Image (tube, grey):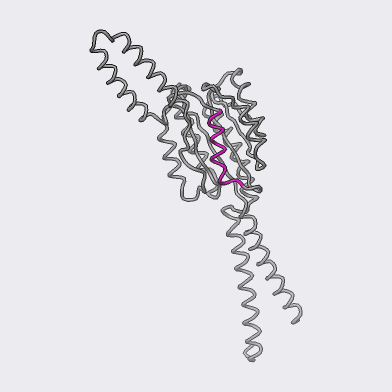
């Protein structure tokens, strides 16, 4: 009887130790996600009565709310809307210069040419920029902050896909480890318009880094010709391409990626239920062990 009790206690201890250490080992793995959302000028166009930018914002917010808080998530965007204040300030300065020059009769034509050239150069430079709006970090306690960044996005400008992908790699660089799973999700309603080659960049990123980043590209409200130019980006990044022609299809496409992310989160053990399961099992094991010890003491004292 005593031997049987001893084996039971040892078994419970093994369960507790194995469960706790398994959780600790699994938790070392991370799931890193970078969401790149198109904020170019064409996103002001409407599908039905709703601007595409509003649809992308809404679907992006739903996506973030659906994710486990243990996912590391970052947000990047491109288009002049992300530099709107800088653009308007500089345009105002150029206009003041133009007005001063235009008031001098001899320089009217030169002033007009100079003003429009500078404004176009300014617009091109700023609209081909891409900004990291929220660095990759654990979502726990941060969802409200990242959603606030999404709500502040404005659609206006060009489509620097290659530059966004290249800088996106830097966003991952401080987070990536060999055992991690990395997802880059690109939502775009058009092709590269800033002179870059996004497919070439995707290939280079894959070759340079041993830690893989899977590219998931969603072509939003695009024609077949544009789709054929976006597909190779996903293929080069070892991911999947989706076409979404409306809000429902965009939500479905990003939902498919969300499922893949959650599968990887489950593997890390960092799920809402996984952590508590280990503690509950461990707690039960500890209570049973204490019960056996107390019972043994009482028996020795002749109280049982």
Tell me if residue 110 comes above or below residue 122 in the rendering: above
Observer-nearest of 106 and 243: 106
Residue drawn where x is 66% and y is 67% of the image? 17
Residue 81 shown left or right of residue 175 in the figure: left
* Residue for point 58% across, 18% down: 223
Specify the farthest residue to the bottom. 302
Of all residues, the one furthest to the front in this rendering is: 106
Quadrant of the frame with the N terminus:
bottom right
**Is residue 266 something that shows in the picture?**
yes
| Quarter of the image with the C terminus in it | bottom right
Q: Is residue 100 above or below residue 9?
A: above
Q: Which residues are magenta?
A: 162-176
Res. 81 image quadrant: top left
Q: Is residue 166 magenta?
A: yes
| Residue 192 lies in the magenta-colored region | no
Q: Is residue 242 left or right of residue 132?
A: right
């Amino acid at each position: 009887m005593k031997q049987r009790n001893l084996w039971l206690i040892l078994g419970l201890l093994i369960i507790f130790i194995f469960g706790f250490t398994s959780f600790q080992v699994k938790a070392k793995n991370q799931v890193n996600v970078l969401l790149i959302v198109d904020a170019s000028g064409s996103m002001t166009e409407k599908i039905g009565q709703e601007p595409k930018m509003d649809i992308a914002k809404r679907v992006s917010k739903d996506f973030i709310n659906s994710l486990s808080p243990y996912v590391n998530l970052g947000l990047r965007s491109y288009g002049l809307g992300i530099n709107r204040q800088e653009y308007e300030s500089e345009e105002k300065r150029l206009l003041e210069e133009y007005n001063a020059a235009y008031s001098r009769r001899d320089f009217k034509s030169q002033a007009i040419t100079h003003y429009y050239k500078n404004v176009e150069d300014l617009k091109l430079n700023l609209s081909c920029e891409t900004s990291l709006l929220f660095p990759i970090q654990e979502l726990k306690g941060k969802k409200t902050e990242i959603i606030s960044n999404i709500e502040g996005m404005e659609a206006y400008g060009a489509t620097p896909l290659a530059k966004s992908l290249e800088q996106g790699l830097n966003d991952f660089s401080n987070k990536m480890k060999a055992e991690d799973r990395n997802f880059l999700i690109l939502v775009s309603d058009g092709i590269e318009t800033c002179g870059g080659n996004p497919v070439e960049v995707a290939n280079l990123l894959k070759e340079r880094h041993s830690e893989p980043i899977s590219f998931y590209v969603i072509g939003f409200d695009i024609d077949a010709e544009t789709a054929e130019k976006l597909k190779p980006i996903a293929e080069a990044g070892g991911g999947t391409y989706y076409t979404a022609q409306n809000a429902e299809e965009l939500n479905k496409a990003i939902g498919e990626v969300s499922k893949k992310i959650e599968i990887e989160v489950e593997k890390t053990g960092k799920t809402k239920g996984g952590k508590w399961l280990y503690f509950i099992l461990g707690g039960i094991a500890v209570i049973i062990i204490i019960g056996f010890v107390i019972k043994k003491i009482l028996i020795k004292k002749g109280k049982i």
